[in-house]
Image (cartoon, rainbow, N blue to C red):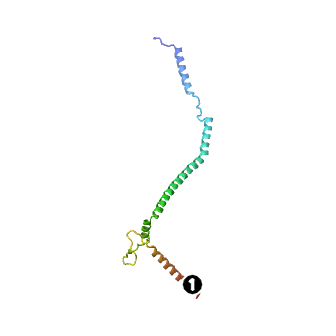
């Protein structure tokens, strides 16, 4: 009979150690909760800070947006002021005043003959794309006078009929 290398006692001791190791592994320590009291307090403080700062931050962003809008409006106003100053400077030039009077008021220089071309229908011809409301100022004036005269005549007729 071949002699065992180890005695029975040594084998039993090794088996016992293996069993103890299995039992030890099976009996794990209970898992600790990862959320400690300090962590919960920190989370509560962070949430309260977020809630407390949300409104002021929103107001800050809104005010920055309003400031940007006001700056944009100021730049637009400055650009409009520059345009108006340029236009005022142009109106100081007598040649520009004459040009505008000729264009808008249909003035002619002494010795010139002004023409108004009609197409034969009794309505003044207008260039293509131009609106018919671009009539000379004196035509508009006489139309207003005629309209007022007709309205007065209707009122007078109505008042006379009402007295009978």
Which element type, helix, strand or loop, lies under badge 1?
helix
Residue named by callout 1: 159
Q: Is residue 51 left or right of residue 122?
A: right
In front of the other: 97 or 51: 97
In the rendered view, tell whether residue 62 sits above or below residue 47. Answer: below
Instruction: Give the residue displayed 55% in from the left and 52% down from the top.
Output: 67
Instruction: Give the residue displayed 52% in from the left and 55% down from the top.
Output: 74
Question: Furthest residue to the bottom?
Answer: 164
In front of the other: 36 or 70: 70
Image position, residue 102 (x, y; %):
42, 70
In the rendered view, tell whether residue 137 sits above or below residue 80. Answer: below
Instruction: Give the residue displayed 56% in from the left and 86% down from the top.
Output: 160
In front of the other: 23 or 116: 116
Instruction: Give the residue displayed 52% in from the left and 53% down from the top.
Output: 71
The quadrant of the image that shows the C terminus is bottom right
Image position, residue 156 (x, y; %):
55, 84
| The quarter of the displayed image where residue 130 is located | bottom left
Q: Badge 1: how crowded within 10 Å, few (<14), some, or many (20+)?
A: few
| Callout count | 1
In the rendered view, tell whether residue 42 sits above or below residue 116. Answer: above
């Amino acid at each position: 009979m071949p002699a065992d290398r180890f005695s029975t006692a040594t084998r039993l001791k090794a088996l016992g150690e293996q069993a103890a190791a299995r039992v030890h592994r099976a009996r794990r320590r209970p898992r600790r909760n990862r959320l400690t009291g300090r962590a919960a307090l920190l989370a509560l403080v962070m949430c309260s800070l977020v809630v407390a700062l949300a409104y002021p931050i929103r107001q800050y962003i809104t005010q920055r947006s309003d400031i940007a809008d006001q700056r944009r409006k100021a730049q637009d106003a400055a650009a409009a002021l520059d345009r108006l100053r340029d236009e005022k400077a142009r109106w100081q030039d007598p040649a520009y005043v004459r040009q505008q009077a000729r264009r808008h008021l249909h003035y002619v220089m002494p010795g010139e003959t002004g023409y108004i071309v009609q197409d034969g229908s009794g309505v003044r011809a207008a260039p293509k794309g131009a609106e018919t409301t671009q009539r000379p100022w004196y035509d508009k004036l006489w139309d207003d006078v005629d309209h007022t005269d007709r309205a007065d005549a209707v009122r007078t007729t109505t008042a006379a009929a009402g007295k009978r």
